[in-house]
Amino acid sequence: MQWRLIEQSPYSAAMNMAIDHAIYESVANGREQPTIRFYKWLNNSVSIGAYQNSKEINLDACKKHSIDVVRRMTGGRAVFHDKMDFTYSVIAPIRVFSYSIKNAYMEICRCIMKTLSDLGIKSALENKNDIIVNGKKISGNASKAMDKGVYLQHGTLIYDIDYEAMPMVLNVPEELVMEKVTSLLQYRKVSQQKAYDTLKNNFTEGKEIKIEELSKYELMRAEDLAKARYNAITLPTGTLLRSKGACYIERGG
């Protein structure tokens, strides 16, 4: 089976989630091959879970510090996405993973764990979606088994940590972030390019890969979705915080 690879590019928070959604539709309707996509965030951003109460994060602080906010199509809790972090999505028919969501999760998370190993960092998978180094989270992942038998999984590999912004917007103490979260740079002084190349090699190993751009349909569809579905979060005051353009920590987790 041939896979499509979409190389890393930065987008706004709303567009990043809208593009994942548009790719899902393309794969589900048979217009595109199973797809691996890497992406960055134009601005520091927060994505909140599909069913999470937006009041659990500090939306006023996000607005004050120009941090974009978007609601994901997947579950879980708030994720802080630093502009330096790496984010991926894998979208494919579940049959590719022997019709098993567990197999899909394990296979994709192993790509991240192998990347860390290649960079000299030993990691483990905990709580089904957290990749841990020495008891601290370095990668959070979320998935959704969607219509027409299509599986979507996306996640973040933390490159560096902003210990000022992350606690502030996620409404957690700085000490908790320092206790629970880590990053590549805390273990290896590896360049962005080397880290990305290693990540890409592990996600594509053993697959027949064709490097492509987003289709014109996907871009148009994503632009529509960004405006209609992913572009605004309601503030506690009732006003709207609009996205202009990860680390992941759960309360009590």
Image (tube, rainbow, N blue to C red):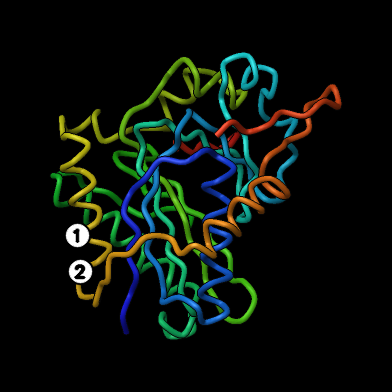
The quarter holding residue 242 reads top right
* Amino acid type assigned to the residue bearing label 1 in the image: Asn
For the C terminus, the quadrant is top right
Looking at the picture, how far across and down is residue 210, in whole percent? 27, 71
The quarter holding residue 221 reads bottom right
Label drawn at residue 201 = 1
Q: Is residue 21 above or below residue 27?
A: above
Residue placed furthest toward the right:
238
Q: Residues within 10 Å of mark 2 (few under 14, many from 20)?
A: few
Q: How many marks?
A: 2
Looking at the picture, how far across and down is residue 174, in whole percent? 49, 17
Horizontal side, residue 234 vs residue 37: left or right:
right
Label drawn at residue 205 = 2
Q: Which of 231 and 98 lies nearest the eye of the viewer?
A: 231
- Residue at 37 percent across and 60 percent down: it is 213
- Residue at 56 percent across and 77 percent down: it is 28
* Amino acid type assigned to the residue bearing label 2 in the image: Glu
- Residue at 71 percent across and 49 percent down: it is 229
Q: Is residue 175 above or below residue 82?
A: above
Looking at the picture, how far across and down is residue 8, in whole percent? 33, 49
Q: Which of 117 and 213 lies nearest the eye of the viewer?
A: 213
Marks 2 and 1 close (CB-CB < 8 Å): yes
What secondary structure is found at the residue carrying circle 2?
A: loop
Q: Is residue 146 above or below residue 22?
A: below
For the N terminus, the quadrant is bottom left
- Residue at 61 percent across and 43 percent down: it is 77
Q: Is residue 148 above or below residue 169?
A: below
Q: Find the distance from the CA under tag 2 to the CA under tag 1.
A: 6 Å
What secondary structure is found at the residue carrying circle 1?
A: helix
